[in-house]
Each structure stands twice: as C-alpha cells, then as structure tokens.
Image (tube, helix red, strand yellow):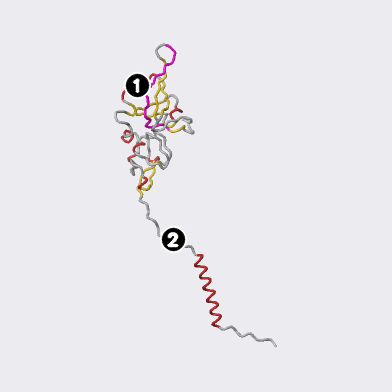
C-alpha cells in the first residue's frame, strides 16, 4: 500500500522563500557598481584668446583668426589676453599654431622688443633663397652674407655683413597651395637682433646685393 506524503509545513516553505530572496538580494548588491566617489577639486581656468587656425608670420589678425578659450590658470603663458578686439588688426611677428594663445611676443610691438638684447635693434632681412629662411627658428644665431658684383668686373664678391645675429622671428614652411604654392608664408622675411651699425650695413647690402645666411650655434 503506497505511503502518503505529508504536506509541507507552511513555516518551512516560508523560510525557503525568504532564503531564496536573500540570496537574490545579495547577488544584486554584489553586482551593483560602486557609487561614484566625491568629485575632485575643479581646476581654476582663465579666459584667453587663441588662434582659430594655423597662422603664419606676417598675418594681420582679423576676428575670424581668433577664438575664445578657457585654459587652466596655472598653465596660461604670460602675455595672453582675453580681449579679442584689442588683437584685431595687429601684425603677427611669428607663426602661431591653432589653439595657441596669442601672446605679446608673437606680435610686432613691445612684446617683440622684449626679446631684443640691450643696445641692439630689430632688423628685417629678406633672403634671396626663400627656402633657407624656413630652416630657421627664433633663437637661432646666423651670419648674414651679401653676394654681389664688386665694381665693374663681373667677378662676384661675398661679404659678411652680420655675425652671430639672433633670429627673433622666422617664416613658416612653404604655402601648400594657391598662387603662392611653394613659397614660405610671410615672403621669407626674417627679423634679426643686431647692433644699429650692423642694421645699417644690412639695409645697404639689401639694396645692392643678395643676402643669405649661414647657421651657427644658438
């Protein structure tokens, strides 16, 4: 004769259900991602005007060349400004990369003069071989050579008209397209720091000869 199973106790069934619920709750808590920690201190920022695109030396700044940005205060270079209107119409003395703050030393004016050693002047020099100018960078030291015809004879003469001149600004590499394709931006114009006498010799040589440079140690 088959034995009859006794019905489960409601209390036992309730305990089993409660245990299953607790196990599921423990799994949910274990798999839940940890709550986000407290936010760190927010770095202080300062508004500053930056270049909206790569700009070559010799650019006359327009509103479209400039953009506003917020940079960390402790990383902000000196000489920056938040006044875009005050920069409009100014002439770049050196190339500026997109996103780079437009500081006073990148402009023709007092900022550029701050890099000129005492007793010297800033002298513009345009080289005969424009590609040579793109090899130079601010801070280089160069000797300037003038090549021309000495007197009525056709034999060329080369004269050193400046020695160890400090390069203040140099043009950017060649323009990639357009009518001026292949030419350095800014026309290959250098600005050198030299003595007043040397600046006079450079001006005289530029009127009668072609100029080039040799590089020395910066």
Against 136, residue 64 (above or below) is below
Q: Quadrant of the N terminus?
A: bottom right
Q: Quadrant of the C terminus?
A: top left
- Residue 24 place in picture, x, y as percent: 53, 71
Against 197, residue 33 (above or below) is below
Q: Which residue is mark 1?
A: 201
Which type of secondary structure does the marked residue at label 1 adopt? helix
Which type of secondary structure does the marked residue at label 2 adopt? loop
Using the numbered discs, state the Cα–Cα distance from disc 1 to disc 2 in whole angstroms: 70 Å
Q: Quadrant of residue 215?
A: top left
The front one of 29 and 48 is 29
Of all residues shown, which one is farthest toward the left?
A: 119
The front one of 7 and 96 is 7
Instruction: Indicate yes or no whether the magenta region holds residue 136.
Output: no
Q: Which mark is residue 36?
A: 2
Of all residues shown, which one is farthest toward the bottom?
A: 1
Q: Which residues are magenta?
A: 153-171
């Amino acid at each position: 004769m088959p034995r009859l199973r006794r019905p489960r106790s409601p209390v036992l069934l309730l305990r089993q259900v409660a245990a299953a619920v607790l196990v599921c709750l423990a799994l949910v808590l274990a798999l839940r991602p940890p709550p986000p920690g407290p936010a760190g201190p927010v770095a202080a920022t300062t508004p500053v005007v930056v270049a909206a695109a790569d700009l070559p030396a010799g650019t006359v700044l327009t509103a479209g060349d400039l953009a506003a940005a917020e940079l960390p205060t402790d990383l902000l270079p000196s000489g920056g400004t938040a006044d875009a209107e005050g920069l409009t119409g100014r002439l770049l003395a050196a190339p500026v990369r997109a996103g780079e703050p437009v500081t006073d030393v990148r402009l023709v004016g007092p900022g550029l003069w701050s890099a000129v050693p005492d007793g010297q002047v800033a002298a513009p020099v345009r080289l005969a071989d424009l590609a040579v100018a793109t090899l130079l960078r601010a801070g280089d030291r160069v000797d300037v050579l003038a090549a021309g015809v000495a007197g009525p004879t056709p034999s060329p003469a080369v004269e050193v008209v400046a020695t160890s001149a400090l390069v203040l600004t140099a043009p950017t590499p060649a323009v990639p397209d357009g009518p001026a394709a292949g030419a350095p931006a800014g026309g290959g114009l250098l600005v050198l720091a030299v003595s007043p006498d040397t600046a006079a010799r450079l001006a005289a040589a530029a009127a009668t000869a072609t100029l080039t440079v040799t590089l020395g140690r910066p």
